[in-house]
Image (cartoon, rainbow, N blue to C red):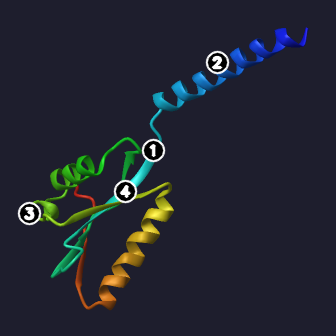
């Protein structure tokens, strides 16, 4: 009688695991991001506003978005992207990063969202 339960248990576990994997793929998780331009050598480090995105967005996609959305990034080639789970973490990171560049005596431009 015990041998009948094992296949049923394995099948149930497999179906449960499969449904969890499919569900995780359906709903991309919202995260927050910002970009940093001219971050290696300046002379002016440019930090974008925090913006909403998903975990599925690649770094090249986010860089293209920032270049399109914020004119300050149009001609910058040295861009990095930071990602955060919460708005608070992202804003704290922007503030801390600005202070670190100021300590290095680099000018920092904190870009604010452009009004349409």
Q: Residue 33 carries which label?
A: 4
Measure the alpha-carbon separation of dots 1 and 2: 27 Å
Residue located 70% across and 22% down the image: 13
Residue 35 vs 25, above or below: the answer is below
Residue located 76% across and 12% down the image: 8
Query: Upstream in the sequence, badge 1 or badge 2?
Result: 2
Q: Could you say where residue 32 lies in the image, as x and y percent from the top left?
A: 41, 54
Q: In which quarter of the image is residue 4?
A: top right
Which one is in front, 7 or 91?
7
Residue 114 vs 37, above or below: the answer is above
SS of the residue at dot 4? strand
Q: Are marks 3 and 4 in contact (CB under 8 Å)?
A: no
Which residue in the protein does label 1 denote?
Answer: 30
Query: Upstream in the sequence, badge 1 or badge 3?
Result: 1
Give left or right: position of 42 versus 84.
left
Give left or right: position of 50 versus 31.
left
SS of the residue at dot 1? strand
Q: Which mark is residue 75?
A: 3
Which residue in the protein does label 2 denote?
Answer: 15
Q: Nearer the viewer, mark 1 or mark 2?
A: 2
């Amino acid at each position: 009688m015990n041998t009948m339960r094992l296949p049923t248990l394995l099948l149930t576990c497999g179906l449960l695991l499969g449904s969890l994997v499919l569900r995780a793929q359906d709903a991309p998780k919202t995260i927050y991001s910002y970009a940093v331009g001219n971050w290696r050598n300046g002379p002016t480090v440019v930090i974008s506003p925090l913006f909403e995105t998903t975990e599925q967005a690649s770094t090249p996609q986010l860089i293209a978005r920032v270049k399109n959305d914020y004119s300050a990034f149009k001609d910058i080639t040295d861009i990095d992207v930071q990602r955060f789970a919460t708005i608070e973490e992202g804003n704290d990171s922007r503030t801390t990063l600005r202070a670190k560049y100021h300590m290095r005596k680099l000018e920092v431009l904190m870009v604010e969202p452009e009004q349409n």
